[in-house]
Image (spheres, rainbow, N blue to C red):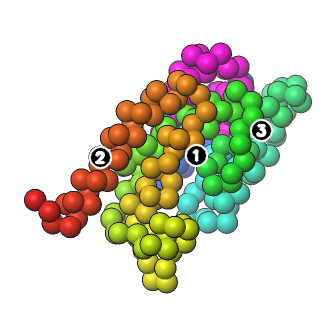
Amino acid sequence: MPTSEQARAWYTDNDPTHDFAHILRVLALARHIAAAEGADIEIVEAAVLLHDAQGSDPGQAQARASHHEGSAEFAGVVLAAEDWPPARIAAVQACIRTHRYRTGEVPESLEAKVLFDADKLDAIGAIGAARALAFAARSGQPFYQEPSERFRATGELEEGEARSAYHEYVFKLGRLRDRLHTRTAREIANRRHKFLSDFFTQLGQEMRGEA
């Protein structure tokens, strides 16, 4: 079984949105959800530790877009070296391949649903707001800008339109609660979603100079 100490070497600290601290937070959430829902904890823990292990740096757009595939392949190598049975390796790989929001692939196993939910819970609430702002700053984008009607309707930017942290909330973060699979995660998400929604409402008011 891969350990947290072993996994630390697979992640860098140059990206505050997908660093090892993210892995540890997701691991804690996944353990809680797995215990409540009756998931295979060994499959869940291995999937969490490996799910962003390859290509997660947002500065490398092409690798980032397929990091779920690269991480699944890497997981196969790591777990085979530990003599995991092929069926259990495949179970971990399935979790990793379906953990991304943007691929549209639906997690099928309970363990895959646990990873998906834990990963998405770390994108909302107070930590979700902090990660959204950190990503915008790292990418040279503003914290807040009103999205165009085109973006609101299609998710596509107008020519010259910035993709602010608020854009990410409109496009993705504000919708995550409704994409979760487990009852346990949805209960946690209700609190986090409210905080995130209130935060971006307040941010918009202050950015517009409202009293």
Sequence order check: which comes first, mark 1 or mark 3?
A: 1
Q: Is residue 28 magenta?
A: yes
Question: How far is disc 3 from disc 2 in space, using C-alphas?
Answer: 35 Å
Q: Which residue is mark 2?
A: 198
Amino acid type, mark 3 = Ala
Q: Residue furthest right?
A: 86
Look at the image and tell me in which quarter the C terminus lies.
bottom left
In primary-sequence order, the first of circles 2 and 1 is 1
Q: Residue furthest bottom?
A: 159
Relative to 13, say whether 64 is above or below: below
- Counting other residues with Cα less than 10 Å from the Cα at mark 2, is it few (<14), some (14-19), or many (20 or more)? few
The amino acid on which the numbered mark 2 sits, given as a three-letter code, is Asp
Measuring from the top left, give residue 35's x and y in whole percent.
59, 16
Q: Which residue is mark 3?
A: 94
Q: Quadrant of residue 34?
A: top right
Disc 3 element: helix
Please name whichever residue, 171 or 142, is drawn nearer the observer in this view of the structure: 171
Q: Quick check: 101 above or below 86?
A: below
Measure the C-alpha gap from mark 2 to mark 1.
Answer: 32 Å
Residue closer to the observer: 177 or 74 = 177
Q: Is residue 207 among the parts visible in the rendering?
A: yes
Please state the extent of the stretch shown in magenta in the rendering: 26-51
- Relative to 137, 123 lies left or right: right
The count of marks equals: 3
Amino acid type for the residue under numbered disc 1: Tyr
Q: Residue visible at 35% across and 69% down?
A: 146
Q: Are marks 2 and 1 in contact (CB under 8 Å)?
A: no
Residue wearing tag 1: 11
Q: Which quadrant: the N terminus?
A: top right
Camera-near label (1 vs 3) is 3
Q: Are marks 1 and 3 in contact (CB under 8 Å)?
A: no
